[in-house]
Image: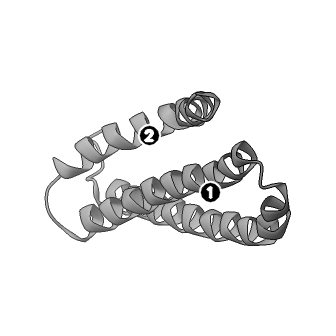
Amino acid sequence: MDLLLSLLGMAALRLPVLIALAVSLVWVVDAPRGTIRSVALWSLALLLLASLAGLALNVVPTWLVQRGEYGNVQMLSWLLRGGHFLIGLVDALGTVLLVWAMTRALRNRSAPAA
């Protein structure tokens, strides 16, 4: 029961980001097809993948501690740090792609009449 509550707590911490990504996906899917839309969809997919992978990596040490395998947590700590680094890279790539798509979309807009 403690593990389930820990998992629910971790998921609740990521819930605002997941909701924001879901709303963003709905907005982008409704946009006209094109390169900008494709890049925006890829970036949102990368951000969603990074968020879910971060959640999964946070579950591993909690699960091992719950089972009483403290030695495995120490042994896996460098792997988990490397995993978090890779997740950070994916998150950064998704953010850069999203900003690129937004910048391109804003530059393609016609200037308002004065």
* Quadrant that contains the C terminus: top left
Q: Residue at x 55, y 68 (%)?
A: 90
Q: Name the residue under label 2.
A: 18
- Which numbered dot is residue 81? none
In this picture, residue 99 sits left or right of residue 80: left
Element under disc 2 = helix
Q: Give residue 109's position: percent from left, percent from top.
A: 28, 53
Q: Give residue 54's position: percent from left, percent from top.
A: 59, 54
Image vertical order of residue 16 relative to residue 72, above or below: above
Identify the image quadrant of residue 42.
bottom left
* Quadrant that contains the N terminus: top right
Identify the image quadrant of residue 40.
bottom left
Element under disc 1 = helix
Q: Which amino acid does label 1 sit on?
A: Leu
Q: How crowded is mark 2: few (under 14 residues within 10 Å), some or many (20 or more)?
A: some
Q: Which amino acid does label 2 sit on?
A: Leu
Front residue of this view, candidates 97 and 42: 42
In this picture, residue 105 sits left or right of residue 61: left
- The residue furthest front is 68
Front residue of this view, candidates 94 and 112: 94
Q: Name the residue under label 1.
A: 57
Front residue of this view, candidates 96 and 58: 58
Q: Give residue 111's position: percent from left, percent from top.
A: 30, 49
In this picture, residue 18 sits left or right of residue 82: left
Q: Residue at x 14, y 56 (%)?
A: 32
Q: Give residue 51's position: percent from left, percent from top.
A: 52, 51
Sequence-first tag of 2 and 1: 2
